[in-house]
Image (tube, helix red, strand yellow):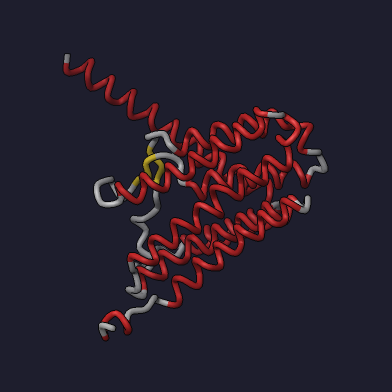
Amino acid sequence: MNPELRRRGIYLLPNLLTTAALFAGFYAIVQAMTGRFEHAAVAIFIAMVFDGLDGRVARMTRTQSAFGAEYDSLSDMVSFGAAPALIVFEWAMKGMGKWGWIAAFVYCAGAALRLARFNTNIDVVDKRYFQGLPSPAAAALVAGFVWIINDLNIQGEVVRWYAFTLTLIAGITMVSTLPYWSGKNINLRRSVPFMVLPVVVLGYVLVSSYPPGVLFALFLAYALSGYVMAAWNWRSRRRQGVSGG
């Protein structure tokens, strides 16, 4: 065997974080199958935390690899594609017949297509913006809805058409070309004004005051921001066209 092939391995730290995200997604599926939907929704948010860390840790420690990128995509498909679709289907849409599983499949297929497009366009798009709603944000939108309604002691079947609509829109928005701010231009190694720290602390306090409501509101606002930005860009181009004509 070639000595170089024998020595070839994987970077441990970022892939441990990816594995943690994958486990959280798998745990969410198991909890949904046993009817513990609040635990399932929380697990999706935990998966988001680990998913956000693995890439940044890999870049900061210079441990990026092709294996890590592929593993991350597979983990994302489980945690932010299959898991949210199954959770919302089991929670609210199981009694809707074909309409329920169609909406769940549209979401799941949207996540798969979104991840495939992201992987193939990663070197050609503006890194400041995502093309379409990122799958973690779509998952947070669906899981946040499940979490807040469950926290209000409302049965999923009561709001099944709202869940159907939200799931369908989230799936379609993932494969749209709407621009979403990526946050990749934030440099964690650069110094920032002191006032940034109190704002961050205030953010933590706000989220901790009522996690399901605040998180759902934040990701709903983020999902709507793509539509607002697209409308603003369209209006700007129209104005330029009129002034140019």
Pick out the residue farthest to the front.
Answer: 1
Residue at image point 81% right, 38% down: 155
Q: In the image, is residue 50 above or below residue 16?
A: above
Q: In the image, is 130 to the left or to the right of 17?
A: left
Query: What's the residue at 46%, 41% (across, down)?
Result: 133
Along the viewing direction, whichever of 112 and 238 lies nearer the viewer: 112
Q: Where is residue 167 in the image (x, y as percent from the top left)?
A: 59, 36
- Please name whichever residue, 17 or 214, is drawn nearer the observer in this view of the structure: 17
Judge from the rendering whether residue 207 lies leftward or rightward of residue 157; answer left or right. Answer: left
- Lateral position of residue 102 relative to residue 6, left or right: right
- The C terminus is located in which quarter? top left
Residue 189 is drawn in which quadrant? bottom left
Residue at 53 percent across and 68 percent down: it is 19
Which of the image's four quarters has the N terminus? bottom left
Decide: is 77 above or below 66.
above
Q: In which quarter of the image is residue 10?
A: bottom left
Q: Position of residue 75 (x, y in %)?
A: 50, 59
Q: In terms of depth relative to the viewer, which is nearer, 152 or 197?
A: 152
Camera-side residue of 62 and 226:
62
Q: How many marks?
A: 0
| Residue 48, horizontal then vertical, whole percent | 54, 57
Q: In this view, does 2 lie above or below 19?
A: below
**Left or right: residue 23 compared with residue 157:** left
Quarter occupied by residue 69: bottom left
Q: Which residue: 56% across, 54% down?
A: 79
Is 221 rendered above or below residue 202?
above
Residue at the left extreme of this rendering: 244
